[in-house]
Image (cartoon, grey):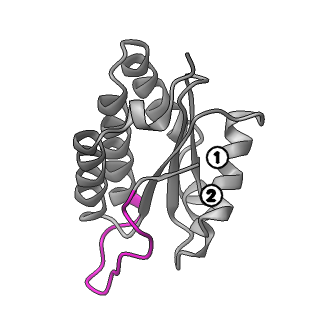
């Protein structure tokens, strides 16, 4: 049986993820989104880049958005950050977040893996893109899919 988004994300889990995004974004001008697919025929990082573009995440003022992409049936995920982030952070920035999430995913702790990754990204983004007084939420915090 192929896993569906509805099996992965119920209302309680969605609320946990949105809460984590909002908490993480309180301390940074960076923007964080989560996107869920059932399956992708593309390599997962390539699909994450395509979704990033489709969601217009590259249009943030500081180019500091990050997408957590999950292909549920494939049991795969990718993290994709915009140009502004990649120019500011160390080379292993995404790998360290990915590796800590991977362990939780392996244990079947999907929501916890995403919440952990979102929190880690928020802490790291705070260092490079601190919250400003004039900061506005440039992207929606909801979970996209499909």
Q: Position of residue 75 (x, y in %)?
A: 55, 22
Residue 23 included in the magenta stretch of the image: no
Q: Which residue is drawn at the image coordinates 35% and 57% (left, top)?
A: 127
Q: Position of residue 42 (x, y in %)?
A: 77, 36
Neighbour tally class for label 1: few under 14, some 14-19, many 20 plus, Cα within 10 Å:
many
Q: Which residues are magenta?
A: 128-142
Q: Which mark is residue 52?
A: 2
> Given the current orientation, which residue lies at the most extreme front position?
1
> Given the current orientation, which residue lies at the most extreme right position?
42
Q: Position of residue 59 (x, y in %)?
A: 59, 75
Q: Which residue is drawn at the image coordinates 34% and 52% (left, top)?
A: 122
Decide: marks 2, 1 in contact (CB < 8 A)?
A: yes
Point out the image quarter for the N terminus. Answer: top right
Lateral position of residue 82 relative to residue 114, left or right: right
Query: For numbered disc 1, what is the local secondary structure?
Result: helix
> Given the current orientation, which residue lies at the most extreme top position?
107
In this rendering, the answer to whether 81 lies above or below 31 is above
Residue 132 included in the magenta stretch of the image: yes
Q: Which residue is drawn at the image coordinates 60% and 54% (left, top)?
A: 86
Q: Which mark is residue 48?
A: 1
Query: Is residue 36 or residue 139 the one in the foreground?
Result: 36
Query: Is residue 144 or residue 103 the one in the foreground?
Result: 144
Neighbour tally class for label 2: few under 14, some 14-19, many 20 plus, Cα within 10 Å:
many
Q: Position of residue 29 (x, y in %)?
A: 37, 70
Query: Is residue 61 or residue 92 the one in the foreground?
Result: 61
């Amino acid at each position: 049986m192929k896993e569906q988004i509805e099996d992965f994300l119920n209302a309680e889990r969605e609320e946990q993820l949105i809460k984590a995004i909002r908490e993480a974004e309180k301390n940074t001008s960076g923007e964080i989104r989560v996107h869920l697919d059932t399956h992708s025929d593309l390599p997962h990082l390539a699909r994450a880049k395509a979704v990033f573009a489709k969601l217009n995440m590259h249009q943030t003022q500081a180019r500091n958005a990050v997408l957590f992409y999950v292909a549920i049936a494939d049991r795969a995920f990718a993290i994709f950050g915009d140009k502004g982030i990649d120019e500011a952070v160390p080379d292993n920035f995404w790998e360290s977040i990915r590796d800590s999430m991977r362990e939780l995913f392996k244990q079947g702790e999907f929501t916890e893996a995403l919440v952990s990754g979102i929190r880690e990204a928020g802490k790291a983004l705070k260092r490079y893109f601190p919250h400003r007084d004039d900061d506005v939420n440039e992207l929606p915090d909801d979970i996209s899919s499909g």
